[in-house]
Image (spheres, grey):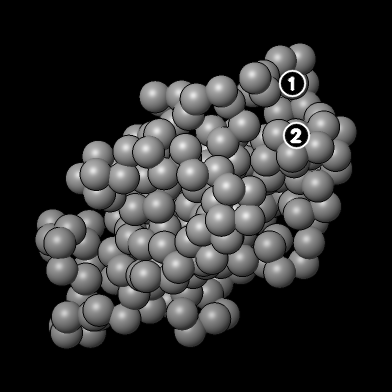
Amino acid sequence: SIPLFQNDFVLILFLLVFSLSLYTFKLGDCPFFNPDEGIHAQVAKNMVVDGDWITPRFNGQNFYDKPILYYWLNALSFKLFGINEFAARFPSALLGALGVLVTFLLGKALYDRWTGFMGAVILSVSFEYLFLSRLVVHDISLTFGILLSLFLFYYGSQQHKVPAWVIPLFYGSLAWSVLAKGPLGLVLPGMIIVPYIILTKSWRLIKELRPRLGMIIF
C-alpha cells in the first residue's frame, strides 16, 4: 500500500502556497490580451447576467466552440469575485495549483516523496504551464483532469485491490476532462492506460475498475 499523505503536509502546503502565489500575483492587473480570453470571459459573463447556464452564448449567438465546464468555472468565479479580469483567470490559477499537487502525488507513487516534490516544483515554473495557469483558456482544466485520472489509475493499480473510493473519482476525472475539452480528455489517458494494462498484463484491473458502473458515472 502506498500512503497518500504520510508526512507530506509541509510539502503539500509549500507547493500550494508557492504555486497559487505564482499564478495569482497581479493576476487581474493586465487586461485581456489574448482573443480567446475575451471570448471565454464574455461567454461566462453572459451565463451570469442572463441566468442561462446551459447554452453558451457569444455576441447573441449560441457558441459551441468548446465544452461547457470551463465556462461554468468562470461563471462561478464571477459570482464569488465579481466580473473582472482576476475572477475570469482565477479558475485557471486554482486548477494549475491543484495540478501541481497531483503531480507531486503521482511522482511520489511512481518513485518517492522527493522525486514527486521536485517534479511538482519543475512543473509549476515551466513556462507554458505557468503561462496557461494565468489565462482564461480551457487547457489547464483539461490538464488537471488528465493528471488526476492517471494518478488515480496508477495508485489504484498498485494496491492489492483497487480501493472503492478510487473508482468514482477516476471516472469522474475522465468525465471532467471530456467536459473540459471534448473527446481528447478520454483519448489521451486511454493511450496510456490501455497499453499499461496490456504490457503489464494487469487484466484484473479491468474487472476491479468496474467499467459498467464507470460508464454510469462517466
Where residue 59 appears, as percent x and y from the top left, is 23, 84
Where residue 1 appears, as percent x and y from the top left, is 65, 19
Where residue 28 appears, as percent x and y from the top left, is 57, 59
Which residue is depicted at the point 75% across and 52% down? 124
Which residue does the numbered mark 1 point to in the structure image? 8
Which residue is depicted at the point 54% across and 65% down? 191
What is the distance, in whole Å, between disc 2 and disc 1 at their CAs? 10 Å
Determine whether label 2 and label 1 are within 8 Å by CB: yes
Q: Is residue 150 above or below residue 43?
A: above
Where residue 216 appears, as percent x and y from the top left, is 20, 45
- In this rendering, position of residue 83 left or right of residue 115: left
Q: Residues within 10 Å of mark 1 (few under 14, many from 20)?
A: some
- In this rendering, position of residue 102 left or right of residue 49: right
Which residue does the numbered mark 2 point to in the structure image? 108
Give the camera-side residue of 152 and 20. Answer: 152
Is label 2 in a helix, a strand or a loop? helix
Is label 1 in a helix, a strand or a loop? loop
Q: Amino acid at mark 2?
A: Lys
Q: Between disc 2 and disc 1, whose residue precedes?
A: 1
Count the marks.
Answer: 2
- In this rendering, position of residue 44 left or right of residue 165: left
Q: Is residue 164 above or below residue 61?
A: above
Q: Give the number of the mark in front: 2 or 1.
A: 2
Q: Residues within 10 Å of mark 2 (few under 14, many from 20)?
A: many
Is residue 94 among the parts visible in the rendering? no
Give the camera-side residue of 119 and 167. Answer: 167
Q: Is residue 198 above or below residue 170?
A: below
- Mark number displayed over residue 159: none
